[in-house]
Image (cartoon, rainbow, N blue to C red):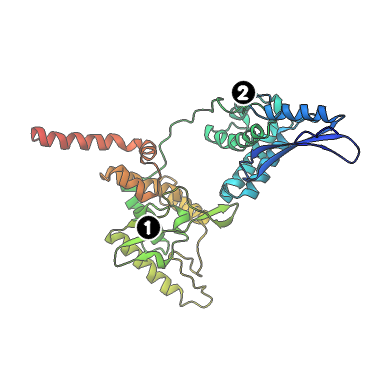
Amino acid sequence: MPVRPTGVYRDRHGAWYVKVTTGRDPLTGRRRQLTRRGFATAAEAAKARRALLAGSDAGRPSPAPGKATTVAELVAEYLDGIDMDGKLAAKTRNSYRDYACAYVLPHLGQLNLGEVTGEVVLAWQRRLIQGGARDGTGLAPNTIRLARAPLAGAFKLAVVRGLVAANPLVGTPRPTPKRAVPRHWSPEQARAFLDIMDGDRTWPIWAFLLGSGVRIGELVWLRWANVDFAERRVRIVEFASSIGYTLVASEGKSRDAIRAIDLDDGAMGVLRAQHDIQARDAQVPGYIPSDYVFTKATGGAFHPQYLSQLLGRLSVEAGLPRLTAHGLRHTSATLMLASGVPAKVAAERLGHADPALFMNLYSHVTPTMQREAAERIGAVLFGS
Protein backbone atom coordinates (compact mmCIF):
# COMPACT_ATOMS: atom_id res chain seq x y z
CA MET A 1 0.00 0.00 0.00
CA PRO A 2 1.53 3.33 -1.04
CA VAL A 3 2.35 5.87 1.65
CA ARG A 4 0.03 8.90 1.60
CA PRO A 5 1.99 12.16 1.22
CA THR A 6 2.05 14.52 4.21
CA GLY A 7 -0.77 17.08 4.17
CA VAL A 8 -2.82 15.15 1.62
CA TYR A 9 -6.24 13.82 2.62
CA ARG A 10 -9.23 11.98 1.14
CA ASP A 11 -12.78 13.10 1.76
CA ARG A 12 -15.84 10.87 2.20
CA HIS A 13 -16.65 11.15 -1.53
CA GLY A 14 -13.29 9.75 -2.56
CA ALA A 15 -11.77 13.02 -3.80
CA TRP A 16 -8.41 14.23 -2.55
CA TYR A 17 -7.58 17.55 -0.87
CA VAL A 18 -4.59 19.25 0.76
CA LYS A 19 -3.91 21.54 3.71
CA VAL A 20 -0.99 23.97 3.94
CA THR A 21 0.05 26.06 6.93
CA THR A 22 1.16 29.52 5.73
CA GLY A 23 2.34 31.17 8.94
CA ARG A 24 0.63 33.45 11.42
CA ASP A 25 -2.18 35.83 10.55
CA PRO A 26 -0.87 39.38 11.27
CA LEU A 27 -4.30 40.41 12.53
CA THR A 28 -5.12 37.58 14.93
CA GLY A 29 -1.73 36.02 15.62
CA ARG A 30 -3.17 32.57 14.83
CA ARG A 31 -1.58 30.21 12.31
CA ARG A 32 -3.31 30.25 8.92
CA GLN A 33 -4.23 27.18 6.87
CA LEU A 34 -5.06 26.98 3.18
CA THR A 35 -7.22 24.10 1.94
CA ARG A 36 -7.51 23.05 -1.72
CA ARG A 37 -10.03 20.40 -2.80
CA GLY A 38 -11.18 18.49 -5.85
CA PHE A 39 -8.11 16.43 -6.89
CA ALA A 40 -8.68 13.07 -8.56
CA THR A 41 -5.56 11.38 -7.20
CA ALA A 42 -3.22 11.71 -4.24
CA ALA A 43 -0.37 12.45 -6.63
CA GLU A 44 -2.23 15.43 -8.12
CA ALA A 45 -3.04 16.68 -4.63
CA ALA A 46 0.60 16.33 -3.53
CA LYS A 47 1.78 18.25 -6.60
CA ALA A 48 -0.69 21.03 -5.85
CA ARG A 49 0.50 21.12 -2.23
CA ARG A 50 4.12 21.52 -3.35
CA ALA A 51 3.06 24.40 -5.61
CA LEU A 52 1.26 26.06 -2.71
CA LEU A 53 4.33 25.75 -0.52
CA ALA A 54 6.62 27.09 -3.22
CA GLY A 55 4.18 29.82 -4.16
CA SER A 56 4.12 31.81 -7.34
CA ASP A 57 5.94 34.81 -5.84
CA ALA A 58 8.85 34.56 -3.41
CA GLY A 59 7.35 31.69 -1.46
CA ARG A 60 3.85 33.13 -1.16
CA PRO A 61 0.99 30.61 -1.55
CA SER A 62 -0.85 30.70 -4.87
CA PRO A 63 -4.33 32.15 -5.02
CA ALA A 64 -7.22 29.77 -4.81
CA PRO A 65 -8.88 28.80 -8.08
CA GLY A 66 -12.49 29.70 -8.69
CA LYS A 67 -14.39 32.91 -7.99
CA ALA A 68 -12.16 35.99 -7.73
CA THR A 69 -12.25 38.08 -4.58
CA THR A 70 -13.51 41.64 -4.95
CA VAL A 71 -12.18 44.71 -3.17
CA ALA A 72 -15.47 45.00 -1.28
CA GLU A 73 -15.13 41.43 0.03
CA LEU A 74 -11.51 41.94 1.01
CA VAL A 75 -12.17 45.25 2.79
CA ALA A 76 -15.09 43.72 4.69
CA GLU A 77 -12.89 40.84 5.86
CA TYR A 78 -10.11 43.22 6.86
CA LEU A 79 -12.40 45.54 8.83
CA ASP A 80 -14.04 42.62 10.63
CA GLY A 81 -10.57 41.31 11.46
CA ILE A 82 -9.29 44.53 13.01
CA ASP A 83 -12.52 44.83 15.01
CA MET A 84 -11.95 41.35 16.46
CA ASP A 85 -8.26 41.99 17.01
CA GLY A 86 -8.81 45.24 18.88
CA LYS A 87 -5.22 46.47 18.50
CA LEU A 88 -6.29 49.70 16.83
CA ALA A 89 -8.21 52.26 18.88
CA ALA A 90 -11.98 52.11 18.59
CA LYS A 91 -12.09 55.57 17.00
CA THR A 92 -9.49 54.57 14.41
CA ARG A 93 -11.43 51.42 13.52
CA ASN A 94 -14.62 53.44 13.18
CA SER A 95 -12.83 55.96 10.96
CA TYR A 96 -11.48 53.17 8.75
CA ARG A 97 -15.02 51.92 8.24
CA ASP A 98 -16.37 55.39 7.49
CA TYR A 99 -13.64 56.22 4.98
CA ALA A 100 -13.93 52.82 3.30
CA CYS A 101 -17.70 53.15 2.89
CA ALA A 102 -17.55 56.76 1.70
CA TYR A 103 -14.53 56.79 -0.60
CA VAL A 104 -13.20 53.29 -1.32
CA LEU A 105 -16.14 50.98 -1.97
CA PRO A 106 -18.17 53.29 -4.27
CA HIS A 107 -15.20 53.55 -6.65
CA LEU A 108 -13.25 50.30 -6.27
CA GLY A 109 -15.52 47.86 -4.43
CA GLN A 110 -16.71 45.99 -7.51
CA LEU A 111 -13.20 45.36 -8.90
CA ASN A 112 -11.45 42.03 -8.52
CA LEU A 113 -8.19 42.23 -6.57
CA GLY A 114 -6.08 41.47 -9.63
CA GLU A 115 -7.57 44.46 -11.44
CA VAL A 116 -6.27 46.96 -8.85
CA THR A 117 -2.88 48.20 -10.02
CA GLY A 118 -0.83 51.24 -9.12
CA GLU A 119 -2.34 53.04 -12.12
CA VAL A 120 -5.85 52.23 -10.89
CA VAL A 121 -5.00 53.60 -7.45
CA LEU A 122 -3.66 56.82 -8.99
CA ALA A 123 -6.80 57.20 -11.13
CA TRP A 124 -8.95 56.64 -8.01
CA GLN A 125 -7.04 59.35 -6.13
CA ARG A 126 -7.51 61.76 -9.05
CA ARG A 127 -11.27 61.16 -9.00
CA LEU A 128 -11.36 61.91 -5.28
CA ILE A 129 -9.37 65.13 -5.79
CA GLN A 130 -11.64 66.28 -8.58
CA GLY A 131 -15.00 65.50 -6.94
CA GLY A 132 -14.90 62.69 -4.42
CA ALA A 133 -16.77 64.41 -1.58
CA ARG A 134 -20.43 63.68 -0.89
CA ASP A 135 -21.40 67.12 -2.17
CA GLY A 136 -19.41 66.69 -5.38
CA THR A 137 -16.47 68.87 -4.38
CA GLY A 138 -12.89 67.65 -4.33
CA LEU A 139 -11.28 66.03 -1.31
CA ALA A 140 -8.28 67.44 0.49
CA PRO A 141 -5.00 65.49 0.21
CA ASN A 142 -5.14 64.58 3.90
CA THR A 143 -8.62 63.07 3.49
CA ILE A 144 -7.32 60.93 0.63
CA ARG A 145 -4.43 59.83 2.86
CA LEU A 146 -6.98 58.69 5.45
CA ALA A 147 -9.05 56.94 2.78
CA ARG A 148 -5.99 54.99 1.64
CA ALA A 149 -5.43 53.54 5.11
CA PRO A 150 -8.16 50.84 5.11
CA LEU A 151 -7.42 49.98 1.48
CA ALA A 152 -3.70 49.61 2.16
CA GLY A 153 -4.39 47.45 5.23
CA ALA A 154 -6.76 45.24 3.25
CA PHE A 155 -4.22 44.67 0.46
CA LYS A 156 -1.52 43.93 3.01
CA LEU A 157 -3.81 41.16 4.24
CA ALA A 158 -4.34 40.00 0.65
CA VAL A 159 -0.58 39.65 0.14
CA VAL A 160 -0.26 37.56 3.30
CA ARG A 161 -3.16 35.36 2.21
CA GLY A 162 -1.61 34.86 -1.22
CA LEU A 163 -4.53 36.51 -3.03
CA VAL A 164 -2.23 39.01 -4.79
CA ALA A 165 1.50 39.06 -5.42
CA ALA A 166 2.07 42.64 -4.23
CA ASN A 167 0.28 45.52 -2.55
CA PRO A 168 -0.61 48.04 -5.31
CA LEU A 169 -0.51 50.93 -2.85
CA VAL A 170 3.15 50.36 -2.00
CA GLY A 171 5.17 52.78 -4.10
CA THR A 172 2.04 54.57 -5.35
CA PRO A 173 2.44 58.23 -4.30
CA ARG A 174 -0.19 59.99 -2.23
CA PRO A 175 -1.37 63.54 -3.01
CA THR A 176 0.93 66.07 -1.36
CA PRO A 177 -0.90 68.15 1.25
CA LYS A 178 -0.58 71.90 1.07
CA ARG A 179 1.43 73.41 3.85
CA ALA A 180 -0.90 75.32 6.17
CA VAL A 181 -0.37 77.34 9.32
CA PRO A 182 -2.53 75.92 12.14
CA ARG A 183 -5.36 78.29 13.03
CA HIS A 184 -4.49 80.21 16.16
CA TRP A 185 -4.81 83.58 17.87
CA SER A 186 -2.13 86.16 18.49
CA PRO A 187 -1.22 86.92 22.12
CA GLU A 188 -3.33 90.08 21.91
CA GLN A 189 -6.34 88.20 20.59
CA ALA A 190 -6.02 85.51 23.28
CA ARG A 191 -5.89 88.14 26.04
CA ALA A 192 -8.84 90.01 24.50
CA PHE A 193 -10.96 86.85 24.49
CA LEU A 194 -10.18 86.06 28.12
CA ASP A 195 -11.01 89.66 29.08
CA ILE A 196 -14.36 89.45 27.29
CA MET A 197 -15.20 86.09 28.90
CA ASP A 198 -14.14 87.16 32.40
CA GLY A 199 -17.02 86.48 34.79
CA ASP A 200 -18.60 83.78 32.59
CA ARG A 201 -18.73 80.31 34.15
CA THR A 202 -16.84 78.90 31.13
CA TRP A 203 -13.92 81.33 31.55
CA PRO A 204 -11.79 78.78 33.49
CA ILE A 205 -12.15 76.28 30.62
CA TRP A 206 -10.77 78.65 27.98
CA ALA A 207 -8.09 80.01 30.30
CA PHE A 208 -6.89 76.52 31.22
CA LEU A 209 -6.82 75.36 27.61
CA LEU A 210 -4.65 78.35 26.68
CA GLY A 211 -2.41 78.08 29.72
CA SER A 212 -1.82 74.34 29.64
CA GLY A 213 -2.16 73.42 25.95
CA VAL A 214 -4.06 70.21 26.78
CA ARG A 215 -6.32 68.56 24.23
CA ILE A 216 -10.05 69.03 24.67
CA GLY A 217 -10.48 65.27 25.22
CA GLU A 218 -7.93 65.49 28.02
CA LEU A 219 -9.60 68.50 29.64
CA VAL A 220 -13.12 67.06 29.89
CA TRP A 221 -11.91 63.96 31.79
CA LEU A 222 -9.39 65.71 34.04
CA ARG A 223 -10.15 64.77 37.67
CA TRP A 224 -9.40 66.61 40.89
CA ALA A 225 -7.39 63.61 42.08
CA ASN A 226 -4.85 64.43 39.35
CA VAL A 227 -4.46 68.08 40.37
CA ASP A 228 -1.62 68.75 42.80
CA PHE A 229 -2.07 72.25 44.25
CA ALA A 230 1.04 71.99 46.42
CA GLU A 231 3.35 71.11 43.53
CA ARG A 232 1.40 73.22 41.00
CA ARG A 233 1.04 70.31 38.62
CA VAL A 234 -1.63 68.27 36.84
CA ARG A 235 -1.32 64.70 35.57
CA ILE A 236 -2.92 63.85 32.24
CA VAL A 237 -3.89 60.18 32.42
CA GLU A 238 -7.42 59.89 30.96
CA PHE A 239 -8.50 60.61 27.41
CA ALA A 240 -12.00 60.98 25.98
CA SER A 241 -12.49 60.19 22.30
CA SER A 242 -15.67 60.65 20.25
CA ILE A 243 -17.20 57.99 18.01
CA GLY A 244 -20.07 59.85 16.48
CA TYR A 245 -21.31 61.62 19.60
CA THR A 246 -20.51 58.74 21.96
CA LEU A 247 -17.53 59.21 24.24
CA VAL A 248 -15.15 56.29 24.68
CA ALA A 249 -11.88 55.97 26.54
CA SER A 250 -8.70 55.97 24.46
CA GLU A 251 -4.99 55.52 25.15
CA GLY A 252 -4.17 59.05 24.02
CA LYS A 253 -2.96 60.52 20.75
CA SER A 254 0.70 59.53 21.15
CA ARG A 255 3.04 57.45 23.26
CA ASP A 256 3.78 60.59 25.30
CA ALA A 257 0.14 61.45 25.95
CA ILE A 258 0.33 60.39 29.62
CA ARG A 259 2.33 63.18 31.23
CA ALA A 260 2.61 65.71 34.04
CA ILE A 261 2.23 69.42 33.29
CA ASP A 262 3.68 72.09 35.56
CA LEU A 263 1.49 75.18 35.96
CA ASP A 264 2.25 78.76 36.91
CA ASP A 265 0.41 80.75 39.56
CA GLY A 266 -2.03 82.09 36.98
CA ALA A 267 -3.08 78.63 35.77
CA MET A 268 -3.41 77.40 39.35
CA GLY A 269 -5.62 80.42 40.02
CA VAL A 270 -7.81 79.26 37.14
CA LEU A 271 -8.26 75.85 38.82
CA ARG A 272 -9.10 77.48 42.16
CA ALA A 273 -11.71 79.64 40.43
CA GLN A 274 -13.19 76.51 38.86
CA HIS A 275 -13.29 74.84 42.27
CA ASP A 276 -15.30 77.79 43.62
CA ILE A 277 -17.69 77.65 40.65
CA GLN A 278 -18.32 73.95 41.30
CA ALA A 279 -18.98 74.64 44.98
CA ARG A 280 -21.67 77.17 44.04
CA ASP A 281 -23.20 74.88 41.41
CA ALA A 282 -23.41 72.03 43.95
CA GLN A 283 -25.83 74.09 46.08
CA VAL A 284 -28.52 73.91 43.38
CA PRO A 285 -31.04 71.04 43.77
CA GLY A 286 -30.53 68.25 41.24
CA TYR A 287 -26.79 68.83 40.89
CA ILE A 288 -24.96 65.66 39.81
CA PRO A 289 -21.71 65.35 41.79
CA SER A 290 -18.55 64.00 40.17
CA ASP A 291 -14.79 64.31 40.55
CA TYR A 292 -14.29 65.94 37.16
CA VAL A 293 -12.57 69.33 37.26
CA PHE A 294 -14.56 71.08 34.53
CA THR A 295 -18.28 70.35 34.79
CA LYS A 296 -21.63 71.65 33.57
CA ALA A 297 -23.84 73.81 35.77
CA THR A 298 -25.91 70.72 36.58
CA GLY A 299 -22.81 68.58 37.19
CA GLY A 300 -21.14 65.93 35.07
CA ALA A 301 -18.50 66.25 32.39
CA PHE A 302 -18.83 68.33 29.24
CA HIS A 303 -18.80 66.79 25.80
CA PRO A 304 -15.73 67.86 23.77
CA GLN A 305 -17.77 68.63 20.67
CA TYR A 306 -20.14 70.85 22.62
CA LEU A 307 -17.28 72.91 24.04
CA SER A 308 -15.57 73.21 20.66
CA GLN A 309 -18.78 74.39 18.97
CA LEU A 310 -19.47 76.78 21.85
CA LEU A 311 -16.00 78.31 21.51
CA GLY A 312 -16.52 78.79 17.78
CA ARG A 313 -19.70 80.73 18.43
CA LEU A 314 -18.24 82.78 21.30
CA SER A 315 -15.12 83.72 19.35
CA VAL A 316 -17.20 85.10 16.46
CA GLU A 317 -19.45 87.00 18.89
CA ALA A 318 -16.29 88.50 20.42
CA GLY A 319 -15.25 89.82 17.00
CA LEU A 320 -12.27 87.45 16.77
CA PRO A 321 -11.29 84.86 14.15
CA ARG A 322 -13.41 81.74 14.66
CA LEU A 323 -11.48 79.14 16.62
CA THR A 324 -12.23 75.68 17.96
CA ALA A 325 -10.79 74.08 21.08
CA HIS A 326 -7.98 72.61 18.99
CA GLY A 327 -7.18 76.15 17.88
CA LEU A 328 -6.61 77.14 21.50
CA ARG A 329 -4.09 74.29 21.76
CA HIS A 330 -2.30 75.65 18.66
CA THR A 331 -2.37 79.11 20.23
CA SER A 332 -0.80 77.76 23.41
CA ALA A 333 1.95 76.05 21.42
CA THR A 334 2.67 79.19 19.42
CA LEU A 335 2.83 81.32 22.58
CA MET A 336 5.32 78.93 24.17
CA LEU A 337 7.66 78.89 21.18
CA ALA A 338 7.43 82.64 20.63
CA SER A 339 8.30 83.12 24.31
CA GLY A 340 11.52 81.15 23.92
CA VAL A 341 10.40 77.81 25.38
CA PRO A 342 12.64 75.09 23.84
CA ALA A 343 10.83 72.99 21.25
CA LYS A 344 11.53 69.76 23.13
CA VAL A 345 10.01 71.15 26.33
CA ALA A 346 6.98 72.52 24.47
CA ALA A 347 6.44 69.18 22.69
CA GLU A 348 6.64 67.26 25.97
CA ARG A 349 4.21 69.65 27.62
CA LEU A 350 1.71 69.21 24.80
CA GLY A 351 2.17 65.43 24.62
CA HIS A 352 3.76 65.38 21.15
CA ALA A 353 5.83 62.27 20.50
CA ASP A 354 8.28 63.85 18.03
CA PRO A 355 9.80 67.33 18.65
CA ALA A 356 11.00 67.49 15.03
CA LEU A 357 7.48 67.01 13.68
CA PHE A 358 6.25 69.46 16.29
CA MET A 359 8.66 72.15 15.07
CA ASN A 360 7.70 71.42 11.47
CA LEU A 361 4.05 72.00 12.36
CA TYR A 362 4.87 75.28 14.06
CA SER A 363 7.51 76.52 11.65
CA HIS A 364 5.56 79.77 11.26
CA VAL A 365 6.98 80.80 14.65
CA THR A 366 10.59 80.33 13.47
CA PRO A 367 11.10 83.84 11.98
CA THR A 368 10.39 85.43 15.38
CA MET A 369 12.72 82.98 17.12
CA GLN A 370 15.42 83.62 14.50
CA ARG A 371 15.17 87.38 15.08
CA GLU A 372 15.49 86.95 18.85
CA ALA A 373 18.48 84.64 18.36
CA ALA A 374 20.17 87.18 16.10
CA GLU A 375 19.63 89.99 18.64
CA ARG A 376 21.04 87.89 21.48
CA ILE A 377 24.12 86.84 19.48
CA GLY A 378 24.67 90.45 18.45
CA ALA A 379 24.45 91.62 22.07
CA VAL A 380 27.16 89.15 23.06
CA LEU A 381 29.52 89.81 20.16
CA PHE A 382 29.00 93.47 19.37
CA GLY A 383 27.19 94.89 22.40
CA SER A 384 24.23 95.81 20.21
Q: Can you tell which mark lies on residue 274?
A: none
Q: Amino acid at mark 1?
A: Phe
Outermost residue on the left side: it is: 383
Q: Can you say whether 217 is above or below 301 in the image?
A: above
Residue that badge 1 annotates: 208
Q: Can you say whether 357 is above or below 276 in the image?
A: above
Q: Nearer the viewer, residue 273 or 43?
A: 43
Q: CA distance from mark 2 to mark 1?
A: 48 Å
Residue that badge 2 annotates: 118
Q: Position of residue 101 (x, y in %)?
A: 67, 40
Is any atom of residue 319 visible in this view?
Answer: no
Q: Nearer the viewer, residue 118 or 217?
A: 118
Q: Quadrant of the N terminus?
A: top right
Q: Amino acid at mark 2?
A: Gly
Instruction: Find numbered disc 1 in the image and state the secondary structure of the residue it sits on.
Output: helix
Q: Quadrant of the C terminus?
A: top left
Left or right of 292, for residue 118: right
The quadrant in which residue 109 appears is top right
